[in-house]
Image (cartoon, rainbow, N blue to C red):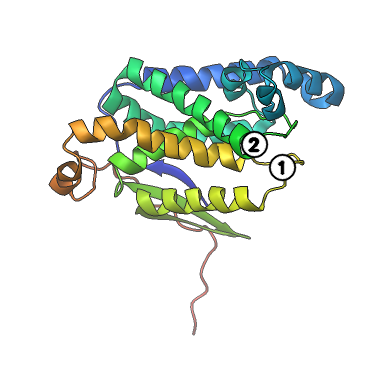
Amino acid sequence: MFPIRDHNPSGRTPYVTYALMAMNIGIFLSYVPLLTEPRALYAFYDAWALIPARIGMGQGFEGLFTSMFLHGGWMHLLGNMLFLWIFGDNIEDEMGHARYLLFYIACGVAAGLAQVWFEPSSRVPMVGASGAIAGVMGAYLLLFPKAKVDILIIFVVFFRIFPIPAWIMLALWFGAQFLGGIAADAGTGGVAYWAHAGGFVAGLIFALPLWLRRGAASFWARNEGHPPHPPAEYPMLKSSIPKVRRK
């Protein structure tokens, strides 16, 4: 189960979102050959990833920034870019290009610091734009809680798209990150759950001034939590498996 699009069109071209996607993809392609060379890849991550234990020793602070443009594989990259493409354009539309870029970077740094706080002794390199994108998702929850998000559900050979309110999808996602962080072993590699959760909370907090300027609760009340413009409409795909009628 994962989101594939929202019904919340933006009013301007999201140049920063596109540029961030291009940077992430371009940087990943620059070191793709290292994916088949574990030692070289580890040395690369050792130089550019975020390593919490190093931060505790007063070193490697540049990793708070550089790590958010690195990824561990194709699925990691494509999943992050999908989430950025779905939610980034609307937050950029609301904040403006320059403020959105600063917001994105600030969320990424906050996400890295959250990972350091909860796993200060970990020497596992952390990479990925997930923390910064989680901040975008936190802001989206605050500004557009009832925007429709299409969820693709795949079960073996059955697939179906269901539109659900953004707050349900985002709340479930955040809950999964929080519970995953509690259950995760800091000494092993895997998902940086605390970076995700920390970035999400940071996005909520950093977007609060914008939400207050928009009218706070009255901003929700004017449109009952929906975006203040008509939703985009898409044809709903159904499973291609033929149904056999009963005689």
Identity of the amino acid at label 2? Met
Determine the image quadrant of residue 130: top right
Pick whichever, 170 or 233, lies toward us: 170
Comes first in the chain, label 1 or label 2: 2
| In the displayed structure image, the side of residue 226 where residue 62 appears, left or right | right
Identity of the residue drawn at 67% across and 34% down: 120
- The residue nearer to you, when weighing 149 against 64, is 64
Where residue 196 appears, as percent x and y from the top left, is 54, 39
Assign a secondary structure to mark 2.
helix
| Residue in view at x 47 percent, y 46 percent | 3
Q: Position of residue 208 (x, y in %)?
A: 29, 34
List the residue tagged with mark 1: 186
Q: Amino acid at mark 1?
A: Ala
Of the two numbered discs 1 and 2 in the rendering, the one whose residue sits closer to the viewer: 1
Residue topped by disc 2: 75
Please give left or right for residue 234 compared with residue 25 in the image: left
